[in-house]
Image: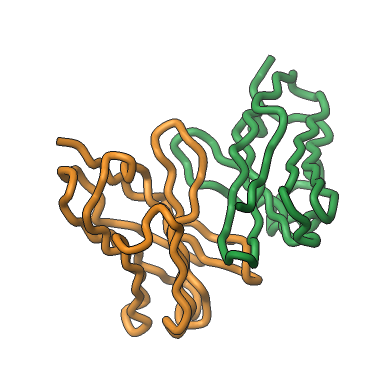
Amino acid sequence: EFVLTQSPATLSLSPGERATLSCRASQSVSSDLAWYQQKPGQAPRLLMYDASNRATGIPARYSGSGSGTDFTLTISSLEPEDFAVYYCQQRSNRPLTWTFGQGTKVEIK
Amino acid sequence: EVQLVESGGGLVKPGESLRVSCAASGFTFSLYTMTWVRQAPGKGLEWVSSIRGGSDYIYYADSVEGRFTISRDNAENSLYLQMNSLRAEDTAVYYCARESRGYFYDYWGQGTLVTVSS
């Protein structure tokens, strides 16, 4: 079974601080990894795709890196609107399924 | 502007059926794989089912295989999820999403809540 493990589960930080979120895959899937942000009561929003490409309209303080099994989402300096839950997501081919990580909540310290 | 609008959610009893819909606009619907993703209350995101543009390939999560049926009407720019034999654990917000590049979702609807309870 293909699994994405996100860490930490919760990140408590202050505005202006740097956030580093991790996503680890149970098997290598190249760089086909996406990140989403979700705020309470809202649908998820695409942040990054192909591990390091920002989606349309996503500010430059968001960056992504990694390949294979280890991926990172970095928010260089947290703005008030960045406090939310973040999910990573990939597709696995054997079997063909689409999987989300369990999420990392970035909360105000 | 791409828009996805879900409808059809509601309260049903265990064992009953429900069909949710997603109306798409702002893009050439038939060219895109469409997906249902759900989120149980207070939980994370779970992929449910995907359907290619021509309905030639359809995929289901193990948790819904044999109970749910995804379909689409490209003439009506609509996506559907027929849910049969519903269980309490199917209670969730159901989102439709447009798939891009074979694996990620670039547009999402606002979701429709399905509650399965006696």
The reply, left or right, for residue A105 in relation to residue A73 is left
Q: Quadrant of residue A13?
A: top right
| Residue A66 position in % (x across, y down) | 85, 50
Chain A colour as displayed: green
**Relative height, residue A4 to residue A77 (above, below):** below
Q: Quadrant of residue A78?
A: top right
**Relative height, residue A83 to residue B62 (above, below):** above
Residue drawn where x is 80% and y is 39% of the image: A74
Residue drawn where x is 74% and y is 22% of the image: A15
The reply, left or right, for residue B97 in relation to residue A23 is left
| Residue B84 position in % (x across, y down) | 23, 58
Chain B colour as displayed: orange
Name the residue nearer the viewer: A8 or A4.
A4
Name the residue nearer the viewer: B79 or B63.
B63
| Residue B62 position in % (x across, y down) | 44, 57
Residue drawn where x is 51% and y is 66% of the image: B98
The reply, left or right, for residue B103 in relation to residue A68 is left
**Relative height, residue B1 to residue A89 (above, below):** below
